Image: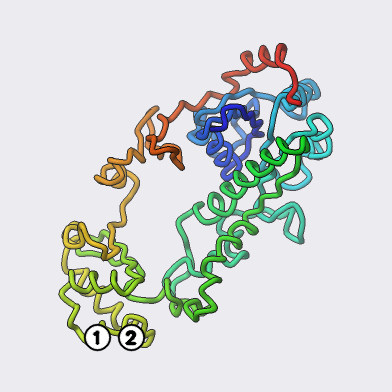
């Protein structure tokens, strides 16, 4: 879908390379500018999963000659993605003003936690800090427990990488229509706060409350996970009454007067305890089979390896063991086609000679 788009990515951690991987999964020619040494890049092995489908050139951007190579590369590019703190790219002489002067159509994507402005803009932080400040962490665990969500998913990926990718695509469409580039300020605090708007929309109906454990989706016995007899877990979220009825029927509780008032908040703590006791009597697979082929809205909580082997996930071909590692294939899909096979990740600087040869013969994007 993006086969005529070239993105230059400056090596970083977390959400920036994820956004670039997503664009590579969708067909873009993503060239990652790796540092010449990986010694000061925590967690960055020689073949990083987030580099899949990309090409690599190794440059030292503090070296004037290497910086000139990057500037030449930008003349052939549609977009740039960087994930440094505010001011770092400017000090390298590669800030938005300099790069848009080189390539006026460039979409300059900036990925940060706190954003390019504001009192915290230059402070360090991580996923949990950003979503803590934005409000997105507030409902991260049951009431009475310290909030803690699945690592990276709400902040780095949901509020960060995906918003950067959408911003890049919007900028690319605008550049094609107007011939003018733009700067995308993708901040995890902004994106993760924006993701709260579905919950915020429930306030008008009284379904959403600030107090934890009192809202429609974070307190009821029909919207949570349960521990089973084998210490595995089952997810339950039968919000609509017709689905709740099927849930009760499968458990033999349809005629139990205690469960008839689904939305009575005063009953939720007691009914949570009753279902905790019931689900603890049998292993997870028993309950999965009991609720199978129904609209009771119950599913097992699986680890990635078990998810790979689940019949539904296997039928869709979501997970792959290609190139020696477990990974999820590209999403979304188009026209009912299966996801493309995962492309390999490059070693650091693997395509340097190839890219330099291209630069010698390619004309700038105009």
Relative to 59, is 198 above or below?
below
Q: What number is the disc on residue 258?
A: 1
Relative to 125, is 226 above or below?
below
The count of marks equals 2
- Left or right: 290, with 301 as reference point: left
Q: Secondary structure at mark 2?
A: helix
Q: Are marks 2 and 1 in contact (CB under 8 Å)?
A: yes
Image quadrant in which you'd find residue 353: top right
Q: Residue at x 18, y 77 (%)?
A: 253
- Left or right: 323, with 196 as reference point: left
Q: Which residue was labeled with disc 2?
A: 267
Q: Can I make out residue 284 in this image?
A: no
Q: Residue at x 77, y 29 (%)?
A: 62
Q: Can I make out residue 286 in this image?
A: yes
Say which label, 2 or 1, has the lower sequence index: 1
Residue 184 in the image, given as x and y percentages of width and height: 71, 46
Instruction: Calculate the distance from the C-alpha at mark 2 to the C-alpha at mark 1.
Output: 8 Å
- Left or right: 335, with 123 as reference point: left
Q: Residue at x 69, y 42 (%)?
A: 171
Crowding around mark 1 (Cα neighbors within 10 Å: few <14, some 14 to 19, many 20+) is few
Residue 100 in the image, given as x and y percentages of width and height: 80, 35
Residue 315 in the image, given as x and y percentages of width and height: 28, 41
Image quadrant in which you'd find residue 311: top left
Q: Secondary structure at mark 1?
A: helix
Q: Residue at x 19, y 78 (%)?
A: 254
Crowding around mark 2 (Cα neighbors within 10 Å: few <14, some 14 to 19, many 20+) is some
Front-most of residues 7 and 254: 254
Relative to 249, is 288 above or below?
above
Q: Quadrant of the C terminus?
A: top right
């Amino acid at each position: 879908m993006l086969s005529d788009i070239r993105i230059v990515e400056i090596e970083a951690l977390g959400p920036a390379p994820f956004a670039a991987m997503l664009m590579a999964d969708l067909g873009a020619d993503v060239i990652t500018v790796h540092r010449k040494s990986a010694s000061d890049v925590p967690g960055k092995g020689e073949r990083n999963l987030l580099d899949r489908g990309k090409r690599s050139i190794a440059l030292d951007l503090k070296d004037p000659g290497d910086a000139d190579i990057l500037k030449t590369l930008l003349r052939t590019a549609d977009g740039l993605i960087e994930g440094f703190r505010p001011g770092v790219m400017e000090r390298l002489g590669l800030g938005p003003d300099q790069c848009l002067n080189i390539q006026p159509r460039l979409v300059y994507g900036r990925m940060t936690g706190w954003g390019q402005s504001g009192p915290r803009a230059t402070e360090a932080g991580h996923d949990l800090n950003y979503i803590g400040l934005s409000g997105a962490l507030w409902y991260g665990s049951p009431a009475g427990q310290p909030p803690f969500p699945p690592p990276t998913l709400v902040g780095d990926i949901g509020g960060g990488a995906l918003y950067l990718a959408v911003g890049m695509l919007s900028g690319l469409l605008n550049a094609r229509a107007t011939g003018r580039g733009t700067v995308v300020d993708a901040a995890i605090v902004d994106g993760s706060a924006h993701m709260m708007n579905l919950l915020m929309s429930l306030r008008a109906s009284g379904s959403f409350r600030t107090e934890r454990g009192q809202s429609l989706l974070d307190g009821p016995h029909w919207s949570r996970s349960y521990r089973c007899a084998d210490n595995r877990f089952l997810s339950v979220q039968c919000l609509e009454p017709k689905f709740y009825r099927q849930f009760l029927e499968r458990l033999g509780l349809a005629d139990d007067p205690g469960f008839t008032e689904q939305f009575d908040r005063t009953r939720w703590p007691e009914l949570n305890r009753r279902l905790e006791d019931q689900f603890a009597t049998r292993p997870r697979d028993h309950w999965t089979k009991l609720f199978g082929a129904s609209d009771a809205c119950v599913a097992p909580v699986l680890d990635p390896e078990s998810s790979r082997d689940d019949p539904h996930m296997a039928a869709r071909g979501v997970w792959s063991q290609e190139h020696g590692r477990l990974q999820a294939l590209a999403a979304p899909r188009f026209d009912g086609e299966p996801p493309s096979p995962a492309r390999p990740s490059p070693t650091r600087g693997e395509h340097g000679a190839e890219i330099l040869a291209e630069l010698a013969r390619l004309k700038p994007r105009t």
